[in-house]
Image: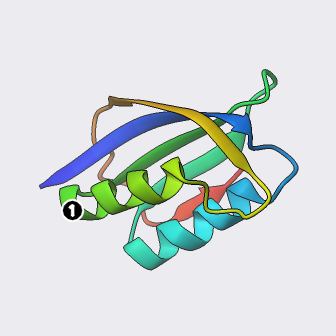
Amino acid sequence: MLVAKKIIVRGRVQGVGFRYSTKIIADKLGIKGSVWNETDGSVHIEAQAESDAMSDFMAKISVSPSPYARVDSVNSKDIPVNEHLHRFRTL
């Protein structure tokens, strides 16, 4: 089943390759969506994929895909699926 989530990651996640590393993981898992920095220092992700791939993605994000980052918290909520997404973008 296709699921979509809005994910907010807090910690040392800007300026340390977190978005780039997130994109690499998303591409490997077939995740569609985007990742971007927010002015409050957090990273926001909108992602959609089959539920198993999403579970793997969430697990990898939670432990930080970048060796230089530190994830303090990950919050997510379900959002509507967007059938028009075709790739994962870094904004």
Task: Tell me what residue is drawn at x 74 percent, y 44 percent.
Answer: 13
Q: Is residue 76 left or right of residue 21?
A: left
> As rendered, which of 26 and 71 lies closer to the eye?
71
Dot 1 alpha-carbon crowd within 10 angstroms: few under 14, some 14 to 19, many 20 or more: few
Q: Is residue 85 among what the camera can see? A: no
Q: Quadrant of the N terminus?
A: bottom left
Q: Position of residue 77 (x, y in %)?
A: 35, 28
Q: 86 or 27, which is in the foreground?
A: 27
- For the image, the number of numbered tags is 1
Q: Secondary structure at mark 1?
A: helix
* On screen, residue 17 above or below 78: below
Residue 71 sits above or below residue 30 on the image? above
Where residue 45 sits in the image (x, y, percent)?
Answer: 54, 42
Q: Residue reaching furthest top?
A: 40
Instruction: Report the residue at 38% width, 72% height from top.
Output: 30
Instruction: Give the labeled residue for mark 1.
Output: 52
